[in-house]
Amino acid sequence: MNYIKELSKLYIELNTNPDKGLATKQVKAAREKYGENKFKEKRPVSFIERLVNQLKDFMIIILIIASLLSFFLASKGDGSYIEGALILAIVLINALLGAIQESSAEKALDSLKKINTHYSKVIRNGELIELKSEDLVPGDIIVLESGDYISADARLIESSSLKVEESSLTGESLAVDKNENAKVDKNSSIGDRVNMVYSGCIVTNGRGKAVVTEIGMDTEMGKIAAFLNNEKTKNTPLQEKLARLGKTITIGAIGACLILFIIGILQGESAFEMFIAAVALAVAAIPESLTGVVTIALSFGVTKMVKKHAIIRRLPAVETLGSASVICSDKTGTLTQNKMTVTRIWSEQDEILENEKRISDEGYKVLKFAELCSNAKIEMNGLEENEFGDATEVAIVRAFKDYGDAKTNLNNNYNRIHEIPFDSQRKLMTTVHEIKDNNTQAKEKYCVIVKGAFDVLLPKCIHGDFEKAKKANSDFGKSALRVISVAYKFYDELPDILDEKTLENDLTLLGIIGIIDPPREEVKESIIKARNAGIKTIMITGDHIITATAIAKELTILENDSEAITGKTLSEMTDEELKRNIDNYSVYARVSPEDKIRIVKAWQSNGEVVVMTGDGVNDSPALKAADIGCAMGITGTDVAKEASDMILTDDNFSTIIDAVEEGRSIYDNIRKTVEFFLSCNIAEVMIVFVSFLLGWGSPILAIQLLLINVVADALPAFGLSKEKTDENIMSRKPIDRKNNILSDGLGFKILLQATMFAIITLVAFYLGRFTKLSGTIAPSKEVGITMCFLVMAFSSIIHAFNCRSSQSIFKIKLKSNKDVLKGAAASIIIMLLICFVPVLSEIFGVETLGSLQWILVIILSILPLIIVEIVKYFVNRIK
């Protein structure tokens, strides 16, 4: 009960000093005693356990029983041991592939968990340092500030206006006021222990200092985690949908197989053979690999997003990204560079426009005098630049540096001897310099430079082209530039009193400088790309509406001024009015955090899927309210990051568009995999079912069906889940969240493809069994089964290439997805070995075919590709 102990006793127990913290030796001793500040994770599932879990599937167990029964019959002299051994071998291979797939998916997901690392500010050896939160030990003195994530339970030592949001621990949404001097009852609940802060909670206001009392599993959050360790990981919504689809198909497949078994018995087939055939067909038809392939697709996509500077914190966000239809973005740092930049300079002689490399002598002089009258500096630290001072002054220093001179050299020629600092009431800054520049007129020994607000400085000037200056100032203002005006005067001898009245009058207006935080170069293109993808971009900012409007127009967010609205106007609208008019506004200026939530909810109430960006503590409610909360990785606080679904490590709007594109691509790849699996699996059921209905008997052996399931279906399917993004993916509308995976005609397309496969394969079986062709092996049931088996396998392998894109296979590069290519090549090699290695041919019941029969197999296997290509051609022409 550390919350009722006296602090002095607590220091002694923890062997710490509240001012100097722990020494290095004490930290080492504490770590040996308490361990690392981590939660114990669930014991990882071993590969053997995954393998055993694969073998627990009901249908697999039935197949194992069937193989054992086959062994038993063979021991009695009825049949061969080979069939039972083969069934068992294929079952084991199938389980092995499933276990490998699960392991790779789990590894990908584990790597994502390691991306988010929290840091803490700690006093050690009398110095304030920042370290990984997992390195905290009891006795550490931690410093807390607004936005910090608390990574250990700690007793407060001091606090100032400290508030902590403890909803993750107590469920209370309102932040709790903390006070180190509060007297807490020993029976008080966690939420009432106001002299403590707890792991997993977030500082929303104020500052404080505390001594760490518990870490890891001993924290209150750790105790809860201990209970949760036995909980299973939840599937994403899409995985749940696919699981339900799989169950529906499973019920249908088992029903079909039962009917098939009865028909076979009525037609005089062996009960045992029919039993194995029915079970094998059920195993082949049920898409048990679907959810695993989806996990691989999701985790692979998330890994790709990390490389593109987007960290996905919650896996369902990947699915939601594909449906994003509105992006509410902050202006500063996300749409703009978050770097004030000089874009225009006016002097009496000329005006230098942005990005112009040349600068006139007059323009150079304006920059030079403005730079002299500033305290900012830019220093090189290796290859990195460190900026010091006001952002506006840094912009001036950078511009001057870019045009030739360094501040150090300038100060040597113009030694500053006096300064009147900038004052928010005066809106001016003045410096006095002793001139040592040989190029300057010898009589002028001293120079007074005044810079500041144009409307304040202009009345203090007696020389200059004031009318031109006023026009330039007006033009700069309309472009939302921050205007800095510069004036000067010379002295041969300095006056006795260097005050404002003396120095800041009778000046000569030199020029004005226009400064702005310019848009990121790539953002305009990304906004146009988003618009073409059916995504509306909204700017939300705390800036003035003139600044916001100018940037928004430059980025093509805004077409006319009526689309911009201020927070004041917004507050006068009811929620119903906002909902009705929400589509009319693209820019929101001077808005509060509460306004952001209203904007998000208004869009959502109109059925839109909203992405919201944010970086501050106050942005967290809006981030939580949005369908996808997107926090800034560089400028974002821990509060914002914890509330988010996605973190932009480069704080760049374009990264959101890249993430949306990747989200759509992942959904596309999952649909391609579903199309491939289901069209092949449903076709297999149709082939066998129709063959029995026609009285032809079984067109394929059980062992062959199982082999197709493992070789022809599974190997190429893993590659499909990693297919590259279609070129036209961002010219489509956002994915409708209400749609199921088979929407937009995919279900109908699968049925048509399955029917096509079934007809073509049954033709192959018919030709092999009933048709006498010159120069071929005589027709027989065995030849028919062989041709059916080969056409079913090869056409499935080739169909993986059909499913890669809605575009023609000849328009996409085969090498662009090496995983599909490798899977298909491996499958074909295995099939050819089975055909031409006598031992394997005998094992898998493959008969020798004549040259014409082989030609027919090849033609029939390629025929689905040709048919699909023709359909694609006409469909794409209609589109």
Image (spheres, rainbow, N blue to C red):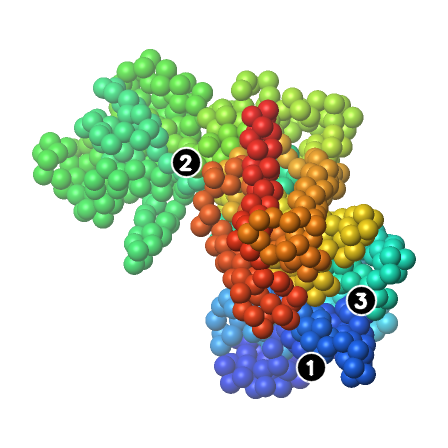
Where 597 falls versus 173 (above or below)? above
Query: Is 288 left, or right, of 427 in this rendering?
Result: right
- Cβ–Cβ under 8 Å for marks 1 and 2: no
Q: Could you say where residue 267 lies in the image, as x and y percent from the top left?
A: 87, 57
Q: Residue at x 59, y 70 (%)?
A: 840
- Type of amino acid under label 1: Lys
Quarter of the picture containing the C terminus is top right
Q: Earlier in the sequence, mark 3 or mark 2?
A: 3
Residue 487 appearing in the image: no
> Under tag 3, what secondary structure?
helix
- Cβ–Cβ under 8 Å for marks 3 and 2: no
As rendered, which of 97 and 792 lies closer to the eye? 792
- Type of amino acid under label 3: Glu
Q: Could you say where residue 875 lies in the image, as x and y percent from the top left?
A: 60, 29
Query: Is 604 left, or right, of 15 in this rendering?
Result: right
Tell me the crowding category of disc 1: few under 14, some 14 to 19, or many 20 or more residues within 10 angstroms, Cα based: few
Q: Earlier in the sequence, mark 1 or mark 2?
A: 1
Q: Could you say where residue 539 lies in the image, as x and y percent from the top left?
A: 57, 32
Q: Which residue is mark 1?
A: 9
Q: Find the residue positioned furthest to the front.
A: 774
Q: Which residue is mark 3?
A: 273
